[in-house]
Amino acid sequence: MAEVSLQNISKSFGNQIALQSVNMRVPDGSFVVLLGPTGAGKTTILRMVSGLDKPDSGQIIINGEDAANQSPAQRNMAMVFQQYSLYPHLSVRQNLAFPLKSPMLRTPADEIKRKVAEVAEVLQISHKLDNKATELSGGEMQRVSIGRALVRNPQIYLMDEPLSSLDAKLRSDLRIELKRIQASLGATMLYVTHDQIEAMTMATHVGVLDHGRLVQFGPPREIYENPVSIYAASRLGSPKINILPASLFPAAPQGAVQIGLRSEHINIGEGLEASVERVERLGDQTRLHLKLGEQDLIVLTDPHTKSAKGDMVKISPKDPLYFDANGERIK
Amino acid sequence: MSGFSVTQPSNRQKWIAGLLVITYAVVTLMPLLWIIATGFKSPEDAISYPPKIVFEPSLEGYVNLFSSRTRITPGMEETLQPPETWYDQVARDAGTIIVGPSRYGQRFLNSVIIGFGSTFLAIVFGTTAAYAFSRFKIPIKDDLLFFILSTRMMPPIAVAIPIFLMFRQLGLNDTQLGMILLYTAVNLSLSVWLLKGFIDEIPFEYEEAALIDGYTRFQAFYKVVLPQAATGIASTAIFCLIFAWNEYAFAVLLTSGTAQTAPPFIPTIIGVGGQDWPAVAAGATLFLMPVMLFTILLRKHLLRGITFGAVRK
């Protein structure tokens, strides 16, 4: 259990700037998800917090103490690596027991046995415990790697895209399971993903990263409804937010260049005329792919809509988000 | 099955491959087989012409190898006791009596101590140095590595005199310790370079995982890197042992009595009581065994591929 705060963290690798004065507070017991495309600096933040890399400048404060001189072991954090990093010379069981046997924890044998069995059960790998770590599928390796973190009760869990190689069913099971474990332990979690469903469902806070800068930090709902920029708005929401020239619709505020409309924020029935290009029926919802002049957009509509390809519909914005020439939000 | 396949060789291809391997094996193993056979020949058979492929086996060579003998002179027979053991009998049949053990056993022991001792040290220092070269930022790293390799570029004879003088000053002449240190130094270049290659191939991610799992840097090295480097360590150890075991030039120049190894000793067997080829061959045959056994013992570790696939690329 711990509170971690990053103060003015900067890091570059050669000429490549990885992080630019990032300030972020991960409150005790929170589930913080870092969102951003590859190269945005998500993994770099995890490595800074874990102590595997040192920031060029800035401080990492763990429970009120500057962690600059603490080794990874002293920071007592568990980490799930994106590339799994299972010990190839050990069995799955030995891999799971490895952190418990460390000189830091020195867990008694019967407790190791109990914890390994418990975690293997949760992750559905009990039948593979005696396999070599190399004799597993990608999804199984990923689960072992999550398990190696979950056997511990660390200050903070760091997870780098832990569900990326799993199939859809297992992924949604584990999403719920991870959230349950985190909530029941009251654990602090710093979690990297570019899956927005994971961000929306698990996070108490989301941090949006863009080229090494933290552009927005807050509850997922707030980032969804109140994004600071087109970039932040595009990170959450499926289908992706529609971005159109602001001049298409009347009543754009001063300086607005673009308008952002989430698919559920478009009224159908009056306004501009658009043609239906495609109808996507997902069962619980139906999406219309529309063409408005030169612009493509996606609108959420009544699941039982009678609209078909080639129809014309009239649309108008509801609760639009306006952005200036740089993509920054105008309020 | 017809046509060309890379993964499924045809029967004909298998036959050709097998034949080539057997031919190569016969050519390379011929001298070895000849030496082993000669060890079991009588001195007459050993030098007979044309050479005998089929012969009556004799242990005279081995008895001669391990004993020093005197020739039975006329008139001596009456005073002799009947032979007590089988090797006394073998010697008596050849017209000699055993007066004591030869120095072969002791020279052989020197070879074992010096060979395995220097291999052990070369591996310990080599592994730690290779790990440092592989993982840490070291100023002038490339120059240092080249310098280490350069120690192997000179022929032994070029450095023999300075080493001889140094050893004399330090009291290391003709000592086991001196030879162990010398062979360790020569083998270090080989072990550092080979092991650096093996350790480079072990991704650093495993150590990072161990650091996170609560281990120190050294414990991560010991628990995570070493087991994965076992293959490399085993093959490097074999190379180091083969060098130290077979080394002749330094051994001839720097040892004469107490620390003499088997290679300079074996040729001297010839001089005792005529050209005793079976004894020389027996000495060479026994001398081959330890390296062969060592290689067979470590063969399991020579198979590559244990680290394949647990880090996603």
Image (cartoon, grey):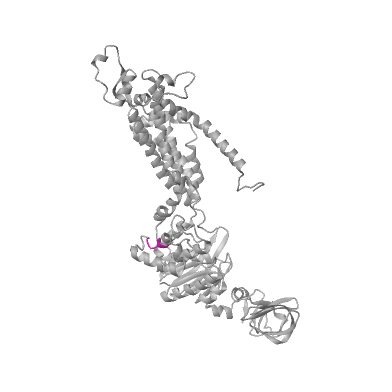
Which residue is at the far bottom? Answer: A270
A275 left or right of A80 in image: right
Q: Position of residue A46 (x, y in %)?
A: 49, 66
A19 shown above or below B23:
below
Which residue is at the far top? Answer: B75
Quarter holding the C terminus of chain B?
Answer: bottom right
A306 left or right of B240 in image: right
Assign the magenta stretch its main secondary structure.
loop
A206 left or right of A106 in image: right
What number of labels is visible? 0
- Residue B240, by quadrant, is top left
Q: Position of residue B57 (x, y in %)?
A: 40, 25
Q: Position of residue B183 (x, y in %)?
A: 41, 36
Q: Which residues are magenta?
A: A96-101
- Residue B166, by quadrant, is top left
User: Is residue B91 found inside the magenta-colored segment of the image?
Assistant: no
User: Is residue A99 found inside the magenta-colored segment of the image?
Assistant: yes
Q: Position of residue B21 (x, y in %)?
A: 55, 37
Nearer the observer, B76 or B52: B52
- Quick check: can you spot residue B140? no
Residue at 39 percent of width and 42 percent of height = B120
A312 shown above or below B275:
below
Residue at 51 percent of width and 58 percent of height = B311
A49 shown above or below B150:
below
- Residue A310, by quadrant, is bottom right
A249 shown above or below B114:
below
Nearer the observer, A14 or B84: B84
- Quick check: can you spot residue B17? yes
